[in-house]
Amino acid sequence: MKIIVVHLCVLGSYRGKGVAKELVSYLRSITQDYLGIGLWCRRDYEASEIWPSMGFSPRADKPGRSYDGKPLTFWWIDHGHPTLFTFDQEELVKSKIVAVIDANVFYDLQTEDDPDSFESKSLLSDYLPNNVTLSITEEIYNEINRCQNLSEIKKWRKFAEGFRMLQSSTDAFEKTRNLLRPLFTSKTKPSDLSDLRQLSRAIAAGAHFFVTRDDFLLELVDQVYEIFGMTIIRPCDLIVHLDELTEGSEYQPARLAGSLIHINLAKSLENTMIVERFQNFTQREKKADFQRQIRNYLANPGVYETYLVRDSVDEPLALIVYGRKESKELEIPIFRVLRGPLSSTLAKHLVFRTVFLSSHEKRILTKVTDQFMSEEVQKALLDSDFFHQDKKWEKFNIADVMIAKELVGRLKSLSSVYLAESAYLVNMSQSLVEASELGNVHILNKIERFLWPVKIIDSVLPTFIVPIKPRWAAELFDEYLASGRFAALIR
């Protein structure tokens, strides 16, 4: 259900003092259980100019009931309640590169014979990979609404329906806008304020890129990335770097072994810095809750080990906590990687390192329970064959060498211990039986990956030996040898 405002009027002597905004803010606070707030307003009323500043966006028009039929516009505030589309958005941001286009780029895509629009039209080419999604935010409707021609408005709204519209809660949007506002102090035109709202909504919705040709917005690239981890970029630059953005981490995963990145236990005095750097603002993680968690882990070194990953100049890159409350499980309650050029690579490296550590300690299950991980970490877990269940990412890692029949027995035995995961284990054992009987090498290979580092010795999997020089092996696969070698080089 939605709330409809039938009438809103402020006494003349009190207008321009923020009364209407306070009323709408209060209405939002007491109607959070509803889908949102809507209202109809005549287009020629002065009030039509203030609705965008309160978080409304125009969605439709209809003829009014006045004698001359002055058109009415429907304005809407969405409360951001989860829907089927919201879930899809969360999965989208985790699995794909999401780029929000601003109004100029949006218009460029439908503008004919304008040389300035050619750059934006490159986004429609076949070079754009399938894992990149061009999106808009609801602020685009405010941009469209400034047009005075209703038929043009209708055309542009129809065009907007062809894009994925990213949603964000009003609270997240306003918090982001307040943080960005100091960067727009010299900008007061309606189009400038719309740019502020557009950028705020893109950040609050978790987009990775904001694509624009606006010179002022492009000047903010460093500040915005430093505060929010989102990149403002030109259309041409997005195209040029897409291969690096989508494939770069595949070519660099082991370079970390030979880099000057180092991992050390965090100190209790670093608690404040950890909270400031690694609190997940975009997912509305509460600072007090995160701070309480970190203090608890640092205060219990017998159960939890809190590690900071730093670069060569000692700047923090990642935070990971290992918990060992259960003898056969390694729990990771905190797994954060800051956004940067190598964030995807680093996330994959840390996931591999974690599973290796778990299996080395003869633990059966690796379990990641952090509810505020970045999309890079979640994608790294997915790529490493973790499965998602009950708000946890889990992977069974069996450090053993055995025949398929023995592994089937082990899986059945584990299913009687890990009741919440029994369906997964039973399904895995059944697949193993069928694959063994049919000699399905492809399925057997998948099962080995799902249960890595287990080895099935009677699976007739093709095996190859590839020689590699010792110095390359050290740099690519052994972080301890590599770090020692690089340390020697810089002494």
Image (tube, helix red, strand yellow):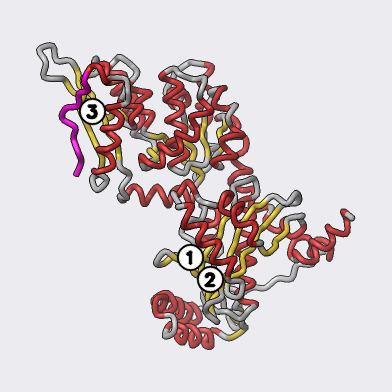
Mark number displayed over residue 74: 3
Please tell me which of labels 1 and 2 falls first in the chain.
2
Q: Where is residue 454 in the image (x, y as percent from the top left)?
A: 59, 78
State the extent of the magenta-drawn residues as a range.
1-11
Q: Where is residue 341 in the image (x, y as percent from the top left)?
A: 64, 45
Please tell me which of labels 3 and 2 falls first in the chain.
3
Say which element carries label 2.
Answer: strand
Mark number displayed over residue 152: none
Residue that mark 1 sits on: 369
Give how far apart the Cα atoms at labels 3 and 1 are: 43 Å
In this view, 270 is above or below 86? below
Residue that mark 2 sits on: 331
Q: In this view, does 380 lie to the left or right of 414?
A: right
Q: Is residue 90 left or right of residue 407?
A: left
Give how far apart the Cα atoms at labels 3 and 2 are: 50 Å
For badge 3, the amino acid type reads Phe
CB under 8 Å between discs 1 and 2:
yes
Please tell me which of labels 3 and 1 falls first in the chain.
3
Say which element carries label 1.
Answer: loop
For badge 2, the amino acid type reads Glu
